Image: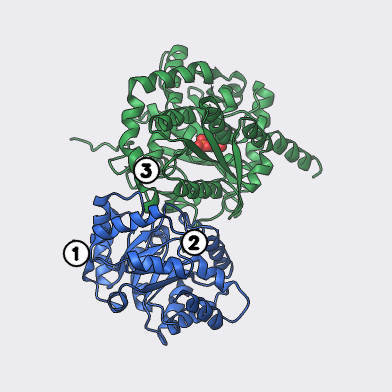
Chain colours: A green, B blue
Amino acid sequence: MIESKVSYHPDQRGYYGNFGGAFIPEMLYANVEHLRKCYLEISHSTSFQEEFNSLLKDYVGRPSPLYHAKNLSKKYGATIYLKREDLNHTGAHKINNTIGQILLAQRIGKKRIIAETGAGQHGVATATVCALMGIECIVYMGEIDIERQAPNVARMKMLGAQVRPATSGSKTLKDATNEAIRDWINHAEDTHYIIGSAIGPHPYPDMVTRFQSIISEEIKSQLKEKTGSELPDYVVACVGGGSNAAGAFYHFLEDESVKLVLAEAAGKGIDSGHSAATSILGSEGIIHGCKTLLMQTEDGQIVEPYSLSAGLDYPGIGPLHAHLIKSGRATVYAATDDEAMHSVLEISKMEGIIPALESAHALSVLSQMNLREEDTVVMCLSGRGDKDLDTFVNYLEKKENG
Amino acid sequence: MDGTTIENRIKESIQKNKGRILNVYFTAGYPKLDDTVQVIESLAREGVDLIELGIPYSDPLADGPTIQKSGEQSLKNGMTLETLFSQVKQARVTTDTPIILMGYFNQMLQYGPEKFLSSAADSGVDGFIIPDMPMYVYEEEYYTLFQKYNLSISFLVSPMTSEKRIKKAADLSSAFVYVVSQSSITGKSGEISPQQISYFEKIRNILGDHPSLIGFGIHDKSTYDLACTYADGAIIGSAFIRALNEEGDIPTLVHNFIKKIR
Ligand SMILES: Cc1ncc(COP(=O)(O)O)c(C=O)c1O
């Protein structure tokens, strides 16, 4: 019997199963269509590959280590490896994508770069590559996020980027993304939009996933070196829009023995009305140009999410992830603000690594996974916690004062 | 595919006033939830040819600040699709002016496409503009449903749309082709540039007889007149919403605004 195999790659129109596509106003069609036609050819070209790989190595500092976290392993009763994306230049995985996209933007002749950012990591990573290449950079950021991620705002400004506050809606990542898309409509001819996650109209989810896939490419060879097998039992990653997860999963998608785990932000609790557990609370619909799972009302109004973590505070999820979840290839767990904060402290004290609040969500779900002694788990430590110090300090003070 | 077979109020109205069509947009449930009917009736009384009723949306990607804010206010006022359909039904008691709903594709999907179209048709809606619904999706999945409920659709073209695609938009648009005047979101209010004029001329040459209206940035008499020179008429949105914000009762505000346009 021939089994029909589920594909984890987008078809011609950008669908992963039921999810994906490009649902955009006509004013963006020409740009998105042009990207669709050229992104594979350009990113596979020798000159692109050489420049991309050399920047990842000498500028970003790749490969990022795969670290055997012995203390966490003991605590959770399995062998746990941390993929140290926090050690990248600018402090998170986001730069893998912005390097790829800036090289692409140059090759299609764009003179101006825009981006959205939540935690500010993608904004910093975009401002960084724009500084490097001498290209004008405008970053949209929700007014609330500008407050809670102040160090990253300062960094973006130092790097020469203009940070524009998004003041509509919940004033967070969703609204920053709306503003960036509107800017793109207004400047369609000269501007490239560097989306920061595996979201948006096709080809963005696939493009971002491919640029981030260096994460799983390295995990495979590093794990082989350390354990003799390139396949772990689990790969775990937090998911906002899904770029670090997509990158950490990519080269394992067809290795069905490897279980893929997504950690969503439950905020104050899944049923609290203050949550960003998108796939659990969401239903099929369209957000920012793609069909996927999102949090919405019966009337199709997009619901404002909540998470203490700005990078996970997004009401949608990438279409690849929606497909992985619905087809059973990936499993989702959620962690609350409190659980994530607990994990931040745990990784800090047990391993001497202060993680980003986003990344800590991935650790928080380990206890829900029924791990066995013989399991090997790779957890994507997507970023470092410097940007969150204010949030950590405020949280701890509040706890102390009851 | 022949997209022009929908015989309804829109087609009649366009035929009657081709060349001087005035299509006025406003957001349903704005300024107050129950103002929808009065604004529709006032516009009808002033003799506008088409009324475009915006369904407020949480994430209106193609819209500028004026329409965004009106939508936010309308949602705060408690607007829902259910309420909107009942308001249209109420307006239909007194007015026959064609009503076109403008909304985003997610609203139609989430409500259920057939229920969405049948409720709209039932209430007296004549057509739709859904700027983020791809043409192929309409063609392959919804063309038949739009036919079934005798609802028209209009697709957008912009300065970056290729000739082939402009023809496709014309083929599929059963009401009119929506000519977006510049690569921008709604609400810009500058003069019309020579570049835009040559773009309008190009579109007119490609479209031939197919009805078209120019929208985005049409905000006063001179931009309306200019649009009428290069297309069958114009769509005014943000400028009208700004007028609704002024002091005064709705019939007077609407009267004064339309009088200034034509
Ligand atoms: C450190 C870190 N991890 C994770 C995320 C979530 O994004 P994604 O799901 O695209 O990886 C962010 C987003 O800002 C981030 O800064």
Give me the chain letter of mark 3. A
Mark 2 lies on a secondary structure that is: loop
Q: Residue at x 38, y 61 (%)?
A: B130
Label 2 vs 1, first from the N-terminus: 1
Looking at the image, which is closer to me, A368 or A66?
A: A66
Q: Residue at x 36, y 38 (%)?
A: A35
Which residue does the numbered mark 3 point to in the structure image? A32
Looking at the rendered structure, the kind of residue marked 3 is: Val
Left or right position of B20 against B7: right
Q: CA distance from mark 2 to mark 1?
A: 31 Å
Q: What percent of the width, then of the height, locates residue B257? A: 51, 76
The image's mark for residue B57 is 2
Looking at the rendered structure, the kind of residue marked 2 is: Tyr
Question: Is B92 located above or below residue A359 in the figure?
Answer: below
The image's mark for residue B2 is 1
Q: Are marks 3 and 2 on the same chain?
A: no
Ligand 1: which quarter? top right
| Number of the front mark, 2 or 1 | 1
Give me the chain letter of mark 1. B
Question: Is A89 located above or below residue A200 in the figure?
Answer: above
Q: CA distance from mark 3 to mark 1?
A: 28 Å
Question: Is A318 located above or below residue A386 in the figure?
Answer: below
Question: Is B262 located above or below residue B179 in the figure?
Answer: below
Left or right position of A165 against A379: right
Looking at the rendered structure, the kind of residue marked 1 is: Asp
Mark 3 lies on a secondary structure that is: helix
- Disc 3 crowd rating (10 Å Cα; few below 14, some 14-19, many 20+) is many
Looking at the image, which is closer to me, A29 or A175?
A: A29
Q: How many marks?
A: 3
